[in-house]
């Protein structure tokens, strides 16, 4: 290598270091080894085809201009993968080996950009650090009439960060909201590992904020962590409703990202205006971009999802069985997957064929398990445990406040979560009249909508119910 050019390149690196982010510099610029092809052409050896793609797209002009600024020569710049050109000398070889491991890594917990010198830090680790599960991709997301628009919008967001802001995905449980949201994050990191992505559930956001509030020294890093990203994914954002401090903090986080053109993606069970206890200013902001919903999948989509799973797992299973599962398991994809996994486990562990009876049993076991949450018995057990009273107290005639309030809450939950009729609830609660149930329901509903403490308490019970089911 020409001594002169080594000096020039060293100077160029100093300029490029200032012109790019620390991570981009370490990941893409510093790792390149220049080689003079002729007096006007420089070929840079890059560690991988991916580096070449990124450099061509983003840094070619910058490098050309910098060299021109330093030398007044219009260099033609090309990039080659390291292996494509035979090595010249041992020294250079060594350089490439040493710098190969310098991949950028963002540690979301520390909020600082850490350059990781460990060669094993790869896209997988970056995803983990961002809170993403690499299993969720656009490739394995089946498109059906129930999610076509949501999928198309999510995909376009992954192609153009910041244009559709925020993207708000809503719909019932187990329909693919988390999958789509994480697919955006995974696609972004695949495309550009220097992008800072955070995936966080609303619940985690609340917990972290509380921790930061209790410990003022963490306050600053909490703010930085969530405001210093290119893509913020908040899953089940409805949980912040009714929590004043969280809404306040999220409002500022939202504004800060929005104003700097950073992408925000939110999911929730309901459209913004239907979330009880969500501040108006947040409702307005959440509705500023595009809201898309996901409905329950139709038969064709359910069947296609099962087929895709079988293909991914290389599990040989008769279409007939898949037809049966797709016909009977209707409400959500999580249940479909539950049945599928059980069928696969059966085949694997027993090595015997799936008879009709076995398939029926497995379907029943999943459907019954999931409807368990719908039974008043489970609700009573959870509520009694929560208030430290006996289940029998709930169905008794006792009227003391320590019993009456939990009873009313349990009745409310039977209606709200289990969708039971008022007379059916009355019957299960010691043969009470339906008007008594109606009264209890309205009273608790009002309290839920108007009082943050009640809302938090009932939400906690709901969460326990979900876990127990
Ligand atoms: P939600 O967040 O809406 O509750 P998830 O995204 O967790 O639902 O989806 C539940 C499960 O179903 C996940 O394992 C997800 O991968 C799968 N799933 C949902 N929709 C689809 C789809 N259209 N194609 C493939 N898998 C899906
Ligand atoms: Mg989810």
Image (cartoon, rainbow, N blue to C red):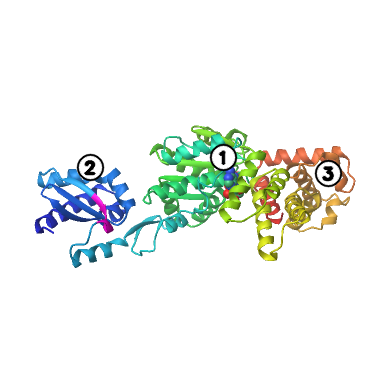
**Residue closest to the eye, 289 or 12:** 12
User: Relative to 214, is 396 on the left or the right?
Assistant: right
Q: Where is residue 249 in the image (x, y as percent from the top left)?
A: 49, 44
Q: Position of residue 144 (x, y in %)?
A: 59, 38
Q: Residue 108 carries which label?
A: none
- On the rendered image, what quadrant is the N terminus found in? bottom left
* Disc 1 CB within 8 Å of nearest ligand 1 atom: yes
Residue 404 visible in image: yes
Q: Which residue is drawn at 89% across and 48% down?
A: 430
Circle count: 3
Q: Is disc 3 in contact with disc 2, using a CB cutoff of under 8 Å? A: no
Spatial separation of the CA atoms under disc 2 and disc 1: 39 Å
**Residue closest to the eye, 258 or 454:** 258
According to the image, label 1 marks what residue? 143
Lower sequence index among marks 1 and 3:
1
Lower sequence index among marks 2 and 1:
2
Q: Nearer the viewer, mark 1 or mark 3?
A: 1
Q: Residues within 10 Å of mark 3 (few under 14, many from 20)?
A: many
Callout 3: helix, strand or loop?
helix
Callout 2: helix, strand or loop?
helix
Residue 238 visible in image: no
Q: Is disc 2 in contact with disc 1, using a CB cutoff of under 8 Å? A: no
Callout 1: helix, strand or loop?
loop
Magenta stretch: includes residue 352: no
- On the rendered image, what quadrant is the C terminus found in? bottom right
- The residue range painted magenta reads 79-84
According to the image, label 2 marks what residue? 61
User: Relative to 216, is 69 on the left or the right?
Assistant: left
């Amino acid at each position: 290598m020409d001594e002169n050019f080594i000096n020039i390149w060293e100077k160029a690196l100093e300029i490029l270091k200032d012109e790019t982010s620390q991570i981009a510099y370490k990941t893409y610029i510093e790792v390149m080894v220049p080689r003079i092809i002729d007096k006007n052409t420089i070929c840079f050896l890059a560690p991988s085809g991916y580096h070449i793609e990124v450099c061509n797209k983003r840094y070619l002009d910058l490098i050309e201009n910098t060299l021109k600024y330093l030398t007044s020569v219009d260099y033609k710049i090309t990039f080659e993968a390291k292996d494509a050109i035979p090595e010249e000398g041992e020294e250079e070889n060594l350089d490439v080996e040493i710098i190969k491991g310098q991949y950028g890594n963002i540690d979301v917990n520390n909020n600082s950009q850490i350059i990781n010198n460990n060669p094993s830090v790869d896209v997988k680790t970056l995803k983990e650090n961002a809170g993403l599960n690499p299993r969720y991709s656009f490739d394995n997301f089946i498109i059906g009439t129930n999610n076509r628009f949501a999928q198309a919008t999510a995909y376009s967001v992954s192609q153009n960060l910041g244009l559709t802001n925020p993207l708000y995905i809503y719909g019932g449980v187990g329909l693919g909201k988390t999958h789509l949201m994480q697919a955006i994050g995974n696609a972004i990191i695949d495309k550009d590992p220097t992008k800072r992505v955070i995936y966080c559930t609303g619940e985690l956001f609340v917990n972290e904020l509380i921790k930061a509030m209790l410990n003022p020294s963490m306050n600053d890093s909490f703010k930085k962590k969530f405001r210093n990203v290119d893509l913020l994914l908040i899953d089940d954002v409805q949980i912040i409703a009714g929590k004043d401090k969280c809404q306040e903090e999220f409002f500022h986080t939202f504004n800060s990202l929005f104003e700097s053109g950073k992408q925000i993606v939110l999911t929730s069970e309901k459209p913004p205006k239907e979330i009880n206890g969500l501040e108006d200013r947040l409702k307005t902001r959440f509705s500023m971009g595009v809201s898309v919903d996901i409905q329950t999948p139709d038969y064709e989509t359910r069947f296609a999802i099962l087929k895709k799973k079988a293909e991914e797992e290389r599990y040989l299973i008769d279409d007939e069985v898949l037809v049966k599962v797709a016909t009977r398991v209707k409400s959500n994809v999580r249940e479909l997957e539950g049945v599928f996994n059980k069928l696969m486990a059966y085949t694997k562990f027993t090595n015997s064929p799936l008879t009709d009876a076995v398939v029926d049993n497995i379907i029943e076991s999943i459907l019954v398990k999931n409807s368990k949450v719908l039974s008043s018995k489970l609700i009573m057990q959870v509520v009694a445990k929560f208030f430290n009273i006996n289940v029998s107290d709930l169905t008794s005639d006792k009227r003391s406040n320590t019993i009456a309030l939990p009873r009313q809450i349990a009745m409310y939950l039977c209606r709200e979560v289990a969708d039971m009729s008022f007379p059916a609830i009355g019957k299960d609660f010691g043969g009470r009249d339906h008007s008594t149930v109606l009264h209890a329901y309205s009273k608790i509903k009002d309290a839920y909508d108007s009082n943050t403490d009640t809302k938090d308490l009932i939400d906690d019970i709901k969460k326990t119910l979900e876990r127990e089911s």
